[in-house]
Image (cartoon, rainbow, N blue to C red):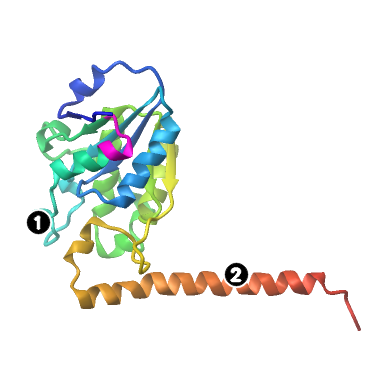
Amino acid sequence: MTTTLLRTADELHARTRTGRRAVVMTMGALHEGHATLVRTAREIAGPDGEVVVTVFVNPLQFGKGEDLDRYPRTLDADLKIAEQAGADVVFAPSVDEVYPGGEPQVRISAGPMGERLEGAVRPGHFDGMLTVVAKLLHLTRPDAALFGQKDAQQLALIRRMVRDLNFGMEIVGVPTVREADGLALSSRNRYLSARERRTALALSQALFAGRDRHAAQEALRARAREVPATH
């Protein structure tokens, strides 16, 4: 399979569609987590469908002092990963293609869900994320769009937006892909020093410990229910 690189929505809309279209939205710098999304999209679209991977670094979701200018941009490598994973198209529009009139005056508001957790320390981030997801859903016109469960708050907000605003497509969450030491794969992991990487593992270790403790408690409860009641 040869993956086609498209830069404009007109090029994408001109393609003949014979089956389901599944879309994977990324900001590029693809890794195995993205490849897993693409392979899952391939299964959903089926052999007669189409898988589209979007690559767009969205300026609206970067706050002041964040890494917009240095965010990794590796389109050639992204094309190879997308092709190996089964993508038919990589849609990599310019900022002018996505925002032809400059920064949009009308945007999606994440509301109260976007003001807590990550949103509490990154004000406006989720508004920018939802705005670009809404635009890319309109531009790509998918039957299904896939997002990683790693970004749990993002996924919850996208599902709520699609439901509240009647977008009419399926949103599929795909389990987090982790490195051997348990760190969730992320394009920004390359920023971490060796010490920071060890510190970052505390989160996944705590989550796994909580999961294991809960499983152990449930197992004990199940055993207790099996033991006949005594005086």
For residue 70, the mark is 1
For residue 89, the mark is none
In the drawing, does residue 218 fall left or right of residue 135?
right
Residue 197 % position (x, y):
25, 72
- Image point 40% across, 53% down: which residue? 149
Q: Quadrant of the N terminus?
A: top left
SS for callout 1: loop
Badge 2: residue crowd in 10 Å (few <14, some 14–19, many ≥20): few
Badge 1: residue crowd in 10 Å (few <14, some 14–19, many ≥20): few
Q: Quadrant of the C terminus?
A: bottom right
- 201 over 7 or under it: above or below: below
- Image point 88% across, 74% down: which residue? 228
- Image point 43% across, 74% down: which residue? 206
- Image point 26% across, 36% down: which residue? 83
Residue 219 % position (x, y):
67, 71
Residue 93 magenta-drawn?
Answer: no
- Report the residue marked by disc 2: 215
Of 160 and 188, which appears nearest the observer? 188
Residue located farthest toward the left when viewing the structure as drawn:
69
In the drawing, does residue 231 fall left or right of residue 170?
right
SS for callout 2: helix
Type of the residue with mark 1: Arg
Residue located farthest toward the right when viewing the structure as drawn:
231
Type of the residue with mark 2: Ala
Residue 85 magenta-drawn?
Answer: yes
* Magenta extent: 83-88
